[in-house]
Every structure is written in structure tokens, then in C-alpha cells.
Image: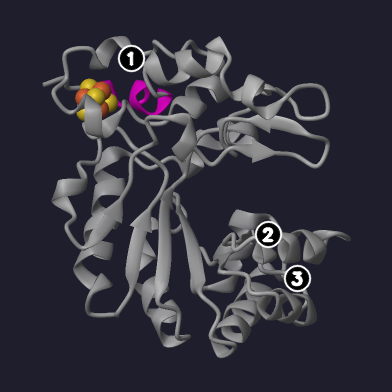
Amino acid sequence: MAERLPELVLTARLASTDVTIISNGSGSLEDYGILVDLGVSVFEIPFHHSVASVHDRLTRTPGSAGKARISLEYLVGRNACVIAVIVLTRQNADDVETTMRSLAGMGVRRVMLNRFNLGGEGFDHMGELTLLPDELGQAYQTANDFAIELGLRVTANVSTPWCIIDPLDYPSLHITSCADRIELMPITVTGLGDVRICNYSPVILGNIYQQNLDTILNQVSVKDFFETIPHICTDCVRYLRCLGGCKAVSQQSGIPLCDHDPVKSAFPTYLSAE
Ligand code: SF4
């Protein structure tokens, strides 16, 4: 655990602010216990497959599946609010029902079912990881079919263009779009003070040790982020709810915001402004 993390959590909790810890699940149970005692609101722990070797292959960390399972079971036992995170890839999407059943059997009640989003080294492994729209739709359909039976609240938090995945087709899932204003973004500040619009965007907007946060967040590039409509979406009646997918992945890809979410470039036949 990072040296000052408990102190930061305590400071936030004393200000009545909720705290979510996103962990790879390999922390010590003692550390998780401290965070539970401090009143952490939510823990997000990855659990990509019920077969340990598949999870370990995806995390590229031998032993990570076993640790994640132990951490999940410990946190459930402590009555903490736990969200198991499944990143859907071509390696695990076929088995999403089995993975959900494993989680339900462990007492987990909330699952975040995110599509693999392009970025970083992921660009080198697109073929092995990125699901075709039909495959992604099938995985969400399976999750939709079993979520209620298994007593799982399933959310999908990586925004996906609605012409690829329409949330209305999956009524038992909670599929979110990106935010349309800065106040609702998961603004990210690193330990060195660099500010980004969200944890997925690679663009550093400024540094809190050099500028006022209001100045950083009110600059023109932030305004552009929200006001730029991708060309393909300009006539689409779904834009106000879809917002064109994930603009941060456009930044990851080095393309302008007026271009569309690169996930659609791979699947041009699915592009459909209505
Ligand atoms: S065309 Fe754009 S706004 Fe319309 S559904 Fe596709 S991504 Fe969303």
C-alpha cells in the first residue's frame, strides 16, 4: 500500500467524501482491513475469468487470480462494498456466464463488465483482445440473461458507441456513456500533481503545483473536449445520450476529437448515424 494512502483516505472520510479504491487485488489482507476500518466506500478488484490461468494470462502476472479471489472473499466477509471488474476480451468473453457464477458463489453482488479499451501496449495486441461487435454484444447478452438470476448488479462503464452496443438492448445491465461536462468526469490527479480529464486520457492538462485547479479545468482544450462532435455523429439523433463513444481513446490513438472513437474504425460496417 502506498505510504500515505490511509492518511489520504482518512482525510477524505473526515470530509464526508466517499472513497473508492481500485486495486489489482494483490494487496495484503491487513492493508485491505485497514482501508475497510477507515470507511472506504467501494473496492474494485479485477476478476477476469474463473480459471486462474486465463486471468493470469490477461494480467500477465502469475498468481494474480488466486490473490484476487482471496481479496474478494475477504472483503465480502468484511461486508465491504466490492465490485468485481471483468474486462471483456477475446480470451474470456465466451465464458462470462461461468465467471459471473463464480463471483456470485463468492458472495459478490456487483460486477463491472467493461469492454477492453484500446490504449498503451494494447494497440500491439488488438487482434487477441478486441472483440468484434457481435462478440461483444453476445457477451453483454449473456450477462443480461443471467444478471438477475445470479443476483448481480452489472454495470458497463467504458462508453461504447451506441451504433455498436445499444444499451436499450440490455435492460438488465447498466451501460453508461461518458459525461458531458467536467463536473461529472473522473478527473485524475497523479502523485506528482499532473491533472488529466479522466484516468484513461493520456493528455496532461496542467499541474496543481503550478496552476490553480479551476484554471486548469476551465481551459479551452477542456471546453473542446466536450463541444467537439465527431464528424460521423453530427446528424445522429442518439448523440446526446451516446456522446460518440470514448473520446479519451481518440487521444490515446493520437487522432483529433472530431474523428470518431477508434473502436469504430475497426468495424466500419457498424457505423450508422441515424
Ligand atoms: S453515430 Fe455517433 S452518436 Fe450516433 S450512435 Fe454512433 S457513435 Fe453514437
Say if the magenta span includes residue 272: no
Q: Main secondary structure of the magenta part?
A: helix
Secondary structure under badge 2? Answer: helix
Residue 198 in view of the camera: yes
Depth check: give the residue in front, 134 or 181. Answer: 181
Residue 264 within the segment the image draws in magenta: yes
Q: Which quadrant is home to the C terminus?
A: top left
Q: Which residues are magenta?
A: 262-269
Query: In which quadrant of the rendered image does the N terminus lie?
Result: bottom right
For label 2, the residue is 12
Asked if labels 3 and 2 touch by Cβ distance under 8 angstroms, the answer is no
Mark 3 or mark 1, whichever is nearer to me = 1
Instruction: Please give the residue where the numbered disc 1 appears in the rendered image.
Output: 229
Residue ID for mark 3: 27
* Mark 2 residue crowding within 10 angstroms, few (<14) / some (14–19) / many (20+): some
Give the image location of residue 13, x and y in percent.
Answer: 66, 65
Residue 26 locus on image (x, y percent) = 72, 69
- Coordinates of residue 24 in the picture (x, y in percent): 66, 62
Q: Nearer the viewer, residue 158 or 177?
A: 177
